[in-house]
Amino acid sequence: MKVITHYLFILFLAFSFVSCSTDDNNNLDTGLNSSEYYQELNVSYGPDNDQKFDIYLPANRNLETEVMILVHGGGWSAGDKNDMNELRNYIRSEFPDMGIVNINYRLADENNQPYPMQLNDITSVINLLKSKQDYYVIDDDFAFIGVSAGAHLSLLWSYAFDTDNNIDMVCSIVGPTNFTDPAYLNNTNPDLQVLLNLYGVDATTAYLEEVSPFHRVTATAPPTILFYGGLDPLVPTTQGTDMRDKLETLGVTHQFTLYPNAGHGWVGLDLLDTSIKLKAFIETHFD
């Protein structure tokens, strides 16, 4: 799936990182100095080279310091956490007291399906952060912002894998939600068909429902904010509108925005609108 994060939130590229110190001490008994800013890149959470994340923690934090988890796109088979750096900059500029974890996950190929492999990777990240809560000096509740395939993973984990209710909020930017949607299955875009093959175009309906946030969501789902493009060649509009309607039926707190003339990403006034709405939603439901 085409990664949109190279131009997502480009309006905020002018924000530069604050000066920081990096602590390489991972001694659980010692813990970090919570009065100082901390970042660590490529933290391993599993044996695979793709099982790494970057973590950025604000100074003067405590055990109630929120942590936003970023999940990149790339059609489940490509992409990298660096694709989310512009969004990371945006969160740091608007929420300087919030921690950020920007994750990589194992990429799918013909021998390694994305499900449940990539959901298991997210579980490993969450479990590691919770086990090191006192070391990092952070809260043990989190939120997701995912883009494209990363948005699908963020929604699915939040709705079906969050057995301990650790997710307070989830954001989907052009994320697929329903693999049984005829508008998805009957789409003739060859690029889309390649992506769908990762989940098995000949899979049973039960399996396609199992990997679809639309079919896994319940009334206990966390507040959800959705952004979609009306001219998206990869994610039909119904992926967003049907998810919106399902959340409405279940009584789940949500917000939905469709940009009629946008594709699999947008710039200009639409992008500004996204940044304003996302900030307000985070302030209300997570910050």
Image (tube, grey):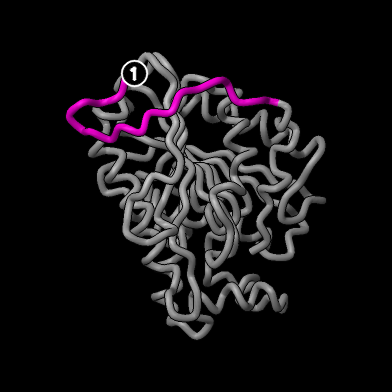
Left or right relative to 9: residue 148: left
Q: Who's the residue at 60% across and 55% down the image?
A: 148
Relative height, residue 163 to residue 18 (above, below): below
Q: Magenta region, mostly helix, strand or loop?
A: loop
* Residue 287 appears in the rendering: no
Secondary structure, mark 1, is loop
Left or right relative to 242: residue 161: left
Q: Position of residue 104 (x, y in %)?
A: 47, 53
Where is the N terminus found, in terms of image quarters?
bottom right
Q: Position of residue 258 (x, y in %)?
A: 70, 47
Boundaries of the magenta span: 15-34
Q: Position of residue 190 (x, y in %)?
A: 70, 78
Q: Residues within 10 Å of mark 1 (few under 14, many from 20)?
A: some
Q: Who's the residue at 51% across and 57% down the image?
A: 152
Q: Who's the residue at 76% across and 55% down the image?
A: 263
In the rendered structure, does residue 86 fall within the stretch colored magenta?
A: no
Inspect the image, locate mark 1, and give the three-letter code of the amino acid beneath it. Ser
- Quarter of the image for residue 143 reads top left
Left or right relative to 207: residue 281: right
Residue labelled with disc 1: 34
